Structures are given as structure tokens and as C-alpha cells.
Image (cartoon, rainbow, N blue to C red):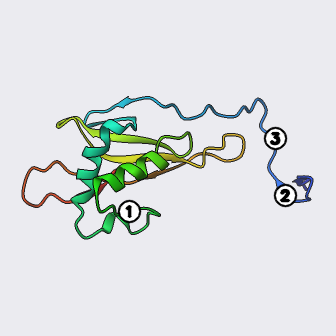
Amino acid sequence: MSSQLTNPLGQPIGAPLDGWAPPPLPPRESFEGRFARVAPIGEQFASDLYAAHVEDREGRTWTYLPYGPFATERDYRHWMETTCFGPDPLFHVIVDNSTDRAVGVAAYMRIAPLLVPSRSATSVCRRSSSGAGAQPTRCT
């Protein structure tokens, strides 16, 4: 029978990991892909992002988000200024390589390398506007 390890509260825990070190913080840098790039968020992307978000005329994108929809680009910019430029959540934009326009945002959230793994959440992206049936879609 193996002995159960416990923490100071008497709760069962796993075996220690030899050589464990906390992971580095997520980088605030760009990543290039075949169809899109992910870049640190900045005010220069506000107009593109607002345009992408207003394509969702029914507001389905915002159902599970604690913010939005935004009535004006000014409202969107205010949200960006108060929410998106700090270290946590760490926001990035998704830029469509075919149009060079920002189409959505993604963020590392609850960054606590010593406590738990980072959680990642995404917001809306839009498909390129080619064709009459272009619909907003989620980025993954």
C-alpha cells in the first residue's frame, strides 16, 4: 500500500516534480501563420476591430462575454483603453494576412505562473468579406 502525500491542510496531493520551475510569462510579441498573424494589441487596430464586430448585427458574438456589443467606435476604443493594454489579460489581435486587417482579438487571462496554467479565451473574428454570405466566426 502506498502512502498518500498531503499538504499542510491535510489534503491529498501528488508527488513533487523534481526540477520544476514556473513557466515564463506569455510574450507580448507577434506570431506569423499561413492565414493570419497574431500581434500585440494597439490603438492602430481599433477601427478594423470595431468594423469586424459590427458585422455581427444580431449580437451573437457577445452572448458569453462580459463586455459589448458597442454602439459606437468611440465606445469600443474606450473599452480597449480601459481593458486591453495591461499585462493581464494580455490581449493580442488577429490580423488576416490576405487583407492585412485586424479581424478579432484573443487574450491570455488569469496569468499566474506560480499558481495555475494560463487560460486562453478568444473573441470574434470575421471571415473575409468575399461573397454575400460572409458570417462572423470564432477564431481558435
| Residue 83 in view, yes or no | no
The residue under the point 9% across, 50% down is 130
- As helix, strand or loop, the secondary structure at mark 2 comes to strand
Could you tell me residue 127's position as x and y percent?
A: 20, 51
- Point out the frontmost of discs 1 and 2: 1
What residue is pinned by disc 1? 68
The residue under the point 31% across, 40% down is 45
Q: Is residue 10 above or below residue 33?
A: below
What residue is pinned by disc 2? 12
**Cα distance, mark 1 to mark 3?**
43 Å
Could you tell me residue 12's position as x and y percent?
A: 84, 57
The residue under the point 41% across, 48% down is 80
Asked whether disc 2 touches disc 3, contact meaning CB atoms under 8 Å apart, the reply is no
Along the viewing direction, whichever of 55 and 127 lies nearer the viewer: 55
- Point out the frontmost of discs 1 and 3: 1
**Cα distance, mark 2 to mark 3?**
12 Å
Neighbours of disc 2 within 10 Å: few (<14), some (14-19), many (20+) = few
Left or right of residue 25: residue 37: left
What residue is pinned by disc 3? 16
| Residue 47 in view, yes or no | yes
Could you tell me residue 135's position as x and y percent?
A: 19, 60
| Count of numbered badges drawn on the protein | 3
Left or right of residue 137: residue 81: right
Left or right of residue 42: residue 126: left
